[in-house]
Amino acid sequence: MQYYNQDTMIYLNGEFVKANNAGADLFGQSLHYGYGAFEGLRAYSTHNGTRIFKAEEHFDRLKLSCKAIGLPYSWDNRELIEKTYELLEVNNLRAAYIRPLVYSGSNMHLTASSSANVMIAAWEWGPYLGQNLLRVNISRIERPNPKSFPIDAKVSGQYINSILASSDAIQKGFDEALLVDQEGFVAQASSENLFIEKDFKIYTPPLGNIFPGITRETVIDICKSLNFDIIEKRLTIKDIYEADSAFLSGTAAGIIGIKQIDDVHFREDWEDSIGSSIQRKYKNLVLEQENYEVII
């Protein structure tokens, strides 16, 4: 898809500039080594106007991701949020996916950068994995070891792991991949968190070997508000195969049901699952329409 055209503006180091004139530092560590941090947010067109869902939480996490890898972060998040709303306005976007990126200055050494830049872009983007129920496989690619990499930070280079896993899944005829950790427990999808339903309870892998998604935390809050039992525990591949239903969560993907994992089809119809109820509640929440049901 086309992410920008000759009129698209981005926010770059305090100014709004045309995306095709921004240029790039070809000697930056971000390009050569993946030394950068980013976020993914969504703005929704609501009856209250354009609203960015959990903007503070996302920009706070961006700052923490930079801190985790020693990348300088000198910006005020309140100002960045204001500039993000301005960016949506100058690009005439009422609903959009938003991508802030902090990337390093010129430095070919394998040492922490002493300077950094911030860029924010936005474009129209439907659900990342589409609208249909997913066919997912257990990947041969493992999650990065938390002892070797800060896996709770949204660091650019980490997503090579995600590209390998999702590309392999697609080549095998699936829509997405599930990755296990170093001990063989199921961790998450390439860029989404996993939830399964079993005997009217919702289970999700605990923190430690997964990315602590903001949408994941929202799902946990929804479960509590709807009095659904939500249990964080390590899940085996056998647990996944024997689940009644399952779904993924993430800002780009939203909440999306899984049809099958490998050659195992879930026994419960998605429309009758707890996950489907959570999906509807999530749509109400982001659209600020919590007093009535969203018709899918």
Image (spheres, grey):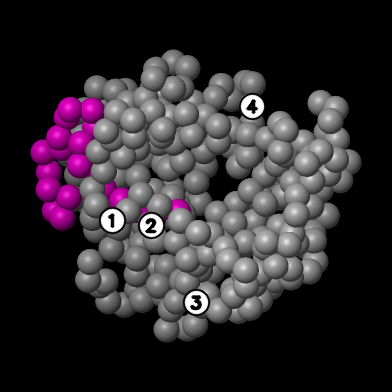
- Tag 2 and tag 4, C-beta contact below 8 Å: no
Q: Residue 131 bears which disc, if any?
A: 1
Q: Circle 2: is it few (<14), some (14-19), or many (20+) Cα within 10 Å?
A: some
Rendering coords of residue 267 (x, y %): 11, 38
Q: Residues within 10 Å of mark 1 (few under 14, many from 20)?
A: few
In the rendered structure, which amino acid carries the disc numbered 1?
Gln
Residue type for callout 3: Arg
Residue at the disc numbered 2? 127
Q: Nearer the viewer, mark 3 or mark 4?
A: 3
Q: Residue at x 25, y 38 (%)?
A: 135
**Badge 4, how many Cα within 10 Å: few under 14, some, many 20+?**
few
Membership of 258 in magenta stretch: yes
Which mark is in front, 2 or 4?
2
**Is the residue under label 2 in contact with that under label 1 (CB below 8 Å)?**
yes
Instruction: Give the Cα separation between the discs numbered 3 and 4.
Output: 37 Å
Provide the residue span drawn in magenta: 252-272
Q: Measure how far apart labels 1 and 4 are at the Cα level.
A: 33 Å
Residue 136 position, x and y percent, is 28, 35
The residues bearing labels 1 and 3 have C-alpha atoms spaced at a distance of 21 Å
Q: Earlier in the sequence, mark 2 or mark 4?
A: 2
> Label 4 near label 1: C-beta < 8 Å?
no
Q: Disc 3 marks which residue?
A: 94
Report the residue marked by disc 4: 149
CB atoms of marks 3 and 4 within 8 Å: no
Q: Cα distance, mark 3 to mark 2?
A: 16 Å
CB under 8 Å between discs 1 and 3: no
Whether residue 259 can be seen here: yes
Q: Quadrant of residue 30?
A: top right
Would you place residue 286 above or below residue 274 in this image?
A: below
Report the front residue among 69 and 158: 158
